[in-house]
Amino acid sequence: MSFDSLGLRADLLRAVASQRYGRPTPIQAQAIPEILAGHDLLAGAQTGTGKTAAFVLPVLNLLAEQGHPQRHPRALILTPTRELAAQVGERVHAYGIHLPLRSAIIFGGVGMQPQVDKLQRGVDILIATPGRLLDHATRRTVDLSRVEILVLDEADRMLDMGFIHDIKRVLRLIPERRQNLLFSATYSDEIRRLADGLLKHPKTVEVARRNTPIAAVSQSAHPVDRSRKPDLLAHLIHREGWEQVLVFTRTKHGANKLAEKLTRDGITAAAIHGNKSQSARTRALDEFKRGLVRALVATDIAARGLDIANLPQVVNFELPNVAEDYVHRIGRTGRAGAVGSALSLVSHDERGLLKGIERLLRREIPMTPVIGFEPSANPPADQHEDDDRSRVRTDFTQRQRSAGRGDRMGAGQAARPGSQGGRRAAPARGR
C-alpha cells in the first residue's frame, strides 16, 4: 500500500514525499481512510508507530476540502505535555506546507500574550495542553464554538496525569456535533469509559499493545553499586563512542546532578524536567537532536512523547518503580523499524524492580558486569540516594498525577497569588 491509495489530496502527498516517507505504517493505513470517511475513531497505538501522521494528514485533508481558512479553530488537538504539543505542531506545519491553513500551539510555561496575538490573527488547527487552553477560554482569548474535529492524543497519559476534569471542561466548550478521534497506547477501563461517553459509533483500530516493546530494541543490563553509576555511565559513553544517548533518572534533582557530572567528565550533557523553563527544555532537545549535546538526561514525564528520529541508545540510569514505564522509556529507540539499544544500570536495591520488568516482558534481560565496576559482594545500605527518592509513590496513577501536576507548572513556578497578572492562581491545576 502507498500513500497515494489512501485518498489524500495531491498537495498533502507532495508534503509526504518531501519527508521521504515510504509506505504508510499500519496505523496510518488503517486510520486515515476511516477519518477521511468522517467516522469517529478509537485508535490503539504507541508513540513510534506513525500515529501523529495518522490523524494530522486526514485532519488537514478534511479542513482543506471544506474551503478557505476561518478565524476560529475548526480542529482541536489536545496533548498531555508541552513537548508533544510542539512536536504535533511541527508535523501540522510540515504536512500542511502547501495548504492555506493556519495553526497555533498553546501550552504553559511561556507567556500568554504571543499566543493571544496568534489566536487573534485566526487559526484553523489548534494544538494545546488542557490547562493552558482553559486559561485562554477563561480569558475569552479563544473561541471553541466552531470546532468540527477533536483529537485526544495519548489519552491514557492525559488521564494518568489527572487531566480528566480539564478534558470534561473542554468538552463543554465545543459543539456536540463533531468528529472525535481518540488515540491511546492502552485500552484501560478508564479509557473505555471516556471513549463510551465521547465517541459515536466509532471505528476501532489497534496496531500495538502497550506492554509490547519494539522488537528492534536490544535490551541488556549491568550490575553496579549505586554510588558508582555516574562513573560507569561516563565510562560507557566514552568507551562505546555514543554520540547520542537518552538517559532516564527518577527525579529532577538526580537529572541535574547527573548532567553536571557528565559535563565535568568531558561529555556534553543537558537535563530536561518539569522545573526547567519551556525555552530551556526546547533548547536542550533541539541541541540534542542536532548533535550539539551527546547525553540528554530526562525524567519520565519530561520525556513522554519525545520524537527523536533514529535515536540509537537509551540508558536507564535508574530503573522506574513501575514496570510499564520501562516499556515507554525503551520505546524512545528502535522506532519505525530502526535498530536501537536499551541498557539499564542496576544497583543491588533495584534487583526486585528488574524482576518485575522481566515478569512484565516475559523474558530475561541479560545482565553482565563491566570490568572495573563489578558490584560489591555485600553492598552496605545505600546512603547516597536522592533525598526525594523516598517520596516516590509506587502507585501508578497517583504517582503519575503528582508528577504531571509538577511537570505542567511552567518554568518550575508554583501557583501563587498574583503570579498571573495579579489574579489568584489555582493552587493545584498545572499547565
Image: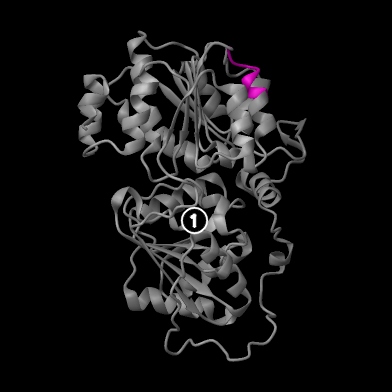
- Which quarter of the figure has residue 45? top left
Residue 285, x across and y down, in percent = 43, 51
Q: Quadrant of residue 349?
A: bottom right
Magenta highlight range: 169-175
- Say left or right for 66 vs 180: left
Residue sitting at 62 percent across and 52 percent down? 275
Based on the picture, tell me whether residue 172 belongs to the magenta stretch.
yes
* Rendered location of residue 39, percent (x, y): 44, 18
Q: Is residue 360 left or right of residue 321?
A: left
Residue 201 left/right relative to 418 = left
From this viewpoint, is residue 109 visible?
A: no
Q: Residue furthest top?
A: 67
Q: Judge whether 265 appears above or below 269 on screen.
A: below
Quadrant where the image shows the N terminus: top left
Drawn side of residue 179 relative to residue 14, left or right: right
Q: Residue at x 36, y 19 (%)?
A: 36
Residue drawn at 73 percent across, 66 percent down: 390
Q: Which residue is under mark 1?
A: 327
- Residue 104 percent coordinates (x, y): 46, 26
Mark 1 falls on what kind of element?
helix
- Tally of marks: 1
Q: Kindly identify the residue that appears in the image at 71 percent across and 49 percent down.
A: 398
- Residue nearest the viewer, comparing 307 with 123: 307
Amino acid type of the residue that numbered disc 1 sits on in the rendered structure = Val
